[in-house]
Image: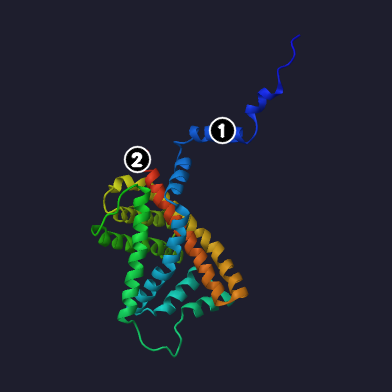
């Protein structure tokens, strides 16, 4: 009977190199699946950095924009924004007090909107819209759209804000009536799908047909609704805990955390739109 071969012959099947090789083989096997393509595209466009950038810009652009809109419309200005957040997330106690202090205007404050504040608001809002547009363009591997894209990205930002806040308002309005839960979800999905497809079309400077954006819009609508339901459960507890520990600054930090989650859903939706596109998603 022959002697067994040397044990060193098995060294190629174990160790870190073998694990890495096995990982590469699995990645190659599933490289054309949607999850792997999503992860690869997210990494390729520096998705994490884009999420943090969008969240920071949203805090200094979108919230002041909402305050200005509320002021111009005569619905209470910053107080209206604070009241909306309190109602939206059912805040009470120290959390409600901290959020109202964060947004309420001091009683002895004088003066209204100034030309300088409007200029700064326009600049920050345009910067936020430009970052959104570049995120979509990066996901679709498209060059910048130039001056032509300025008007389109502004319109896209308006549509996106209407979709994000309108779906929440619509859900609350329908829940107050006799509508069933399935009707609420159906109406929200219809609004978000249509709005997201239009917003993506505008952010891409109309260089991608709407029909190619519909599959991604459907997936994005599901993502947005899940995020909305999740934050409705998670955020009130976070605001309350932070407000109890740190006061007003704690409430502000909780809102930043919320904006990070919302920004992550936006970046994920941009990536989904590219990967799920019927004609162009396989590139």
| Secondary structure of residue under mark 1 | helix
| Secondary structure of residue under mark 2 | loop
The residue lying furthest to the left in this view is 148
| Dot placed on the residue nearer the N-terminal end, 1 or 2 | 1
Residue at x 58%, y 67% (from the top left corner) = 238
Task: Give the crowd class for mark 2: few <14, some 14-19, many >=20 residues within 10 Å.
Answer: some
Which residue carries the number 1 mark? Answer: 21
Q: Is residue 117 visible to the viewer in this orientation of the structure?
A: yes
Q: Nearer the viewer, residue 226 or 29?
A: 29
Check the image and report above or below for 231 versus 32.
below
What colouring method underlies this structural image?
A: rainbow
Check the image and report above or below for 211 versus 101.
above
Q: Nearer the viewer, residue 161 or 250?
A: 250
Residue 278 is tagged as 2
Residue at x 61%, y 70% (from the top left corner) = 241
Give the quadrant of residue 224: bottom left
Residue 240: image location, x then y, percent? 59, 71
The residue lying furthest to the top in this view is 1
Number of dots carrying numbers: 2
In the image: residue 127, left or right of residue 42: left
Q: Quadrant of the C terminus?
A: top left
Residue 235: image location, x then y, percent? 54, 65
């Amino acid at each position: 009977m022959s002697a067994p071969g040397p044990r060193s012959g098995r060294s190629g099947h174990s160790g870190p190199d073998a694990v890495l090789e096995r990982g590469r083989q699995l990645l190659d096997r599933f490289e054309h699946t949607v999850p792997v393509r999503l992860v690869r595209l997210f990494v390729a466009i520096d998705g994490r950095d884009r999420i943090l950038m969008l969240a920071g810009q949203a805090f200094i652009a979108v919230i002041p924009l909402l305050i200005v809109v509320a002021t111009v419309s005569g619905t209470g200005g910053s107080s209206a924004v604070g009241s909306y957040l309190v109602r939206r997330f059912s805040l009470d106690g120290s959390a409600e007090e901290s959020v109202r202090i964060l947004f309420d205007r001091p009683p002895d404050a004088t003066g209204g909107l100034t030309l300088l504040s409007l200029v700064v608001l326009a600049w920050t809002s345009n910067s936020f819209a430009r970052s959104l547009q570049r995120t979509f363009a990066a996901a679709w591997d498209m060059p910048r759209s130039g001056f032509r894209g300025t008007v389109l990205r502004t319109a896209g930002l308006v549509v996106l804000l209407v979709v994000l806040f309108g779906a929440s308002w619509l859900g609350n309005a329908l829940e107050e009536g006799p509508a069933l839960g399935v009707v609420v979800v159906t109406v929200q999905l219809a609004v978000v799908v249509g709005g997201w497809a239009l917003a993506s079309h505008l952010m891409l400077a109309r260089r991608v047909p709407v029909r190619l954006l519909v599959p991604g819009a459907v997936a994005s609508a599901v993502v947005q609704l899940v995020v909305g339901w999740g934050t409705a459960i998670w955020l009130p507890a976070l605001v309350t805990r932070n407000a109890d520990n740190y006061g007003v600054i704690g409430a502000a930090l909780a809102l930043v955390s919320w904006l990070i989650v919302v920004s992550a859903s936006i970046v994920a939706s941009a990536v989904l739109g590219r990967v799920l596109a019927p004609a162009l998603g396989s590139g």
